[in-house]
Amino acid sequence: QVQLVESGGGLVQPGGSLRLSCAASGSTSNMDTMSWYRQAPGKERELVARIDNLGDSTNYADSVKGRFTIPRDNAKNTVYLQMKSLKPEDTAVYYCQCESRYYIGMAYWGKGTLVTVSS
């Protein structure tokens, strides 16, 4: 089992920046690709950004390209979501996900952290 704990959410004004962190613990050798998802009120959960195990490959939703980055520090078992130029439509609960290296199709989720972009 891999436990994931997100932090760093909060209230930020439009145009501002925020950095989310996702710290992993437990069976960290089982960690593979890590992702950030978000779910806005009344909407489905969507993929925001993804990074592979070595940090060589990243993918971003079109809506966040050029504004968000997903660095990863394997020594700290932590993945980040660096967000800038935030917009009200970025308001959502942000979830961290880790895919299992050993069990295909299995993924672990954090409980989420709320980001509110408002003036």
Image (cartoon, rainbow, N blue to C red):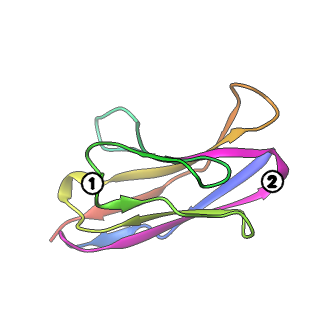
Instruction: Decide whether residue 13 is among the magenta residues.
Output: no
Q: Position of residue 79 (x, y in %)?
A: 59, 61
**Residue 36 in view, yes or no:** no
**Residue 78 in view, yes or no:** yes
* Dot placed on the residue nearer the N-terminal end, 1 or 2: 2
Which image quarter is the N terminus in? top right
Number of other residues with Cα within 10 Å of mark 1, as a class: few under 14, some 14 to 19, many 20 or more: many
Q: Is residue 9 above or below residue 42?
A: below
Residue type beneath disc 1: Asp
Q: Is residue 49 left or right of residue 26?
A: left
Could you give the CA–CA distance between mark 1 and mark 2, rounded to whole angstroms?
Answer: 30 Å
Q: What residue is disc 2 on?
A: 28
Residue, x 27% and y 72% (percent of image)? 12
Query: Where residue 90 is drawn, which disc sits there?
Result: 1
Residue, x 42% and y 61% (percent of image)? 69
Instruction: Give the image quarter of residue 19.
Output: bottom left
Q: Is residue 31 left or right of residue 66?
A: right
Residue type beneath disc 2: Thr
User: Tags 1 and 2 in contact by the CB under 8 Å rule?
Assistant: no
Q: Which residues are magenta?
A: 14-36
Q: In the displayed image of the protein, which residue is found farthest to the left?
A: 119
